[in-house]
Amino acid sequence: MKKKKTGSFLYSWKVAPYVFILPLLISFLVFWVYPLVSTVVMSFQNIQPGITTWVGLANYTKLLKDKTFHIAIKNSFTYMVLTCALLIPFPMAFACIMNSNMMKAKGFFKAILYLPALTSVVVAGTIFRMMFSEIDGSLMNQFMVSLGFEPYAWLKNAGTAMATMVILCCWRWTGVNMLYFLAGLKSIDTELYEAAEIDGASRWQRFTRITFPLLKPTTIYVLTISIYAGLAMFLESYMLWNGNSSPRNIGLTIIGYLYRRGIEKNEMGYASAVGLVLLVIALIINFTQLGLTGTFKRKED
């Protein structure tokens, strides 16, 4: 009677697939499930150096009355809405232009638009802080003076501060989203455009009847990651104000408030509650937009 070779169990057709996914499964459990469960537990605790006490819903009750937290939510939500409103139509338009036959030097312009994404957030934030500085010699104030206006404190007023953060975001990520839409455009059959052109459809009609509907999966993907990125923004704000303290908290985001409570004030229990509220908000917004766009609908046979 022949004996089974050593290791034959691992080479089994039934076992092999699980062996291949085991590293991913372990990483998922260690780096996602375990931190999430720990965060849920800590959100019901008051954690101080060497002392941990169970406080129940006290952290969440405190959040409801925390005006600074409300400001952070408002700032993050406003930032998310503005960036989504700009980082979908403009990259889509640029992608359509890049994909057209009349566009010359496509590779050069793709590189120019994508180059900001390769710039470090620290470097980009520092440059924008200097550009929008309140001193007379800053780039934006020199521009204002050339137009006959007085120098302006861009980063000390809520409206212009938010506009600066949005401009920084658009500068960095327009090229990336454009590449996503370009990939979506490449998957559209060119025969559809040829047939529409023969039927006398204008460029606008071809865009609204062919391009835009068939770019729906790409648009949903870009919208989903833009929502997450908008709510998770922190480092850009930190670099613009050279720290986590902006005047009247005009640049404070939810992640920034989590950092302030958890790292700067060493209130990990309260910071965990902030993080879970952010997770719930992000899930609600994303699931709502996925439902409204019909992503969850099952295709009819």
Image: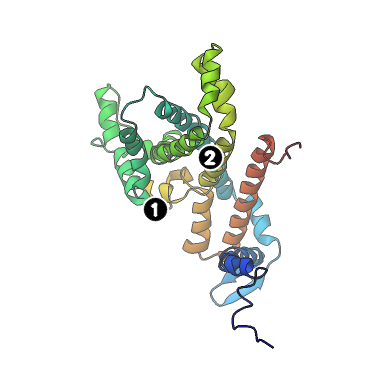
Mark 1 or mark 2: whose residue is earlier in sequence: 2
Outermost residue to the right: 301
Residue 61 location in percent, x, y? 68, 56
Q: Nearer the viewer, residue 198 or 101?
A: 198
37 to 274, vertically: above or below: below
**Circles 1 and 2 in contact, beta carbons < 8 Å:** no
Q: Looking at the rendering, in which quadrant would you find the N terminus?
A: bottom right
Give the colour scheme shown.
rainbow
Amino acid at circle 1: Gly
Instruction: Name the residue carrying label 1.
Output: 243
196 w.r.t. 284: above or below: above
Quarter residue 99 falls in: top left
Q: Is residue 86 visible?
A: yes
| Residue 222 tag number | 2
Furthest toward the front, the residue is 1
Please, what is the three-letter code of the amino acid marked with disc 2?
Val
In the displayed structure, would residue 197 be above or below residue 223? above
Tell me the CA gap for discs 1 and 2: 29 Å
Q: Residues within 10 Å of mark 2 (few under 14, many from 20)?
A: some
Residue shown at 51% from the left, 39% from the top: 79
Could you tell me which residue is drawn at 53 percent across and 13 percent down? Answer: 198
Q: Position of residue 147 (x, y in %)?
A: 28, 22
